[in-house]
Amino acid sequence: MKVFLDSSVLLSACGSERSLSRLITEIAGERKWELVSVAYCRAETAKNLGKFGAAASDHWKSLQRKVAWAPNALTTRRPLLLTASKDKPVLISALAERCDLLLTLDKGDFGMLLGKEVYGMKVLTPRDFLVSQGLG
């Protein structure tokens, strides 16, 4: 299963040892989940990592090796309903990579899509994903 990680999930995984985002990144290999993200999310994470302290920066170094980094996709021929233009590249890139789901904690910008499918790709929070996998 291809799991796209939004920058909010990447930051959460780095920022807290007890976050569900961190749990997902730690068990991905044994569950056969391929973690995917893009340069846009990588840059967004690196830019905001300082807010979380030195331990988060250390974890970021190891987490980057667990993620397959794809190039940004900026356009699609499919219509998309997403009000935040800054998050359209995230959604478009996840679709371009043919991910099974997009994980996000950004309820403000992705709220209208949470729990729904966008062209066959589910948009979930880490908690809802773990529950769907029988882990919550």
Image (spheres, rainbow, N blue to C red):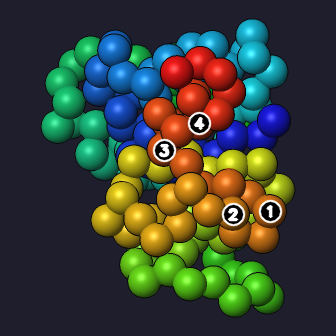
Badges 2 and 1: C-beta atoms under 8 Å apart?
Answer: yes
Corner quadrant of residue 11? top left
- For marks 1 and 4, give the CA distance: 15 Å
Q: Which residue is mark 4?
A: 129
Q: Residues within 10 Å of mark 2 (few under 14, many from 20)?
A: some
- Label whose residue precedes the other's in the sequence (3 or 1): 1
Query: In the image, what residue type sits under mark 2?
Result: Glu
Residue 117 circle label: 2
- For marks 2 and 3, give the CA distance: 13 Å
Q: Secondary structure at mark 1?
A: loop
Residue 125 circle label: 3
Corner quadrant of residue 120? bottom right
Badges 4 and 3: C-beta atoms under 8 Å apart?
Answer: yes
- Label whose residue precedes the other's in the sequence (2 or 4): 2
Query: In the image, what residue type sits under mark 1?
Result: Gly
The residue depicted at 82 percent of the width and 56 percent of the height is 98
Q: Secondary structure at mark 3?
A: loop
Q: Nearer the viewer, residue 39 or 35?
A: 35
Q: Which residue is mark 1?
A: 120
Query: In the image, what residue type sits under mark 4?
Result: Phe
Badges 1 and 4: C-beta atoms under 8 Å apart?
Answer: no
Q: Is residue 16 left or right of residue 53?
A: right
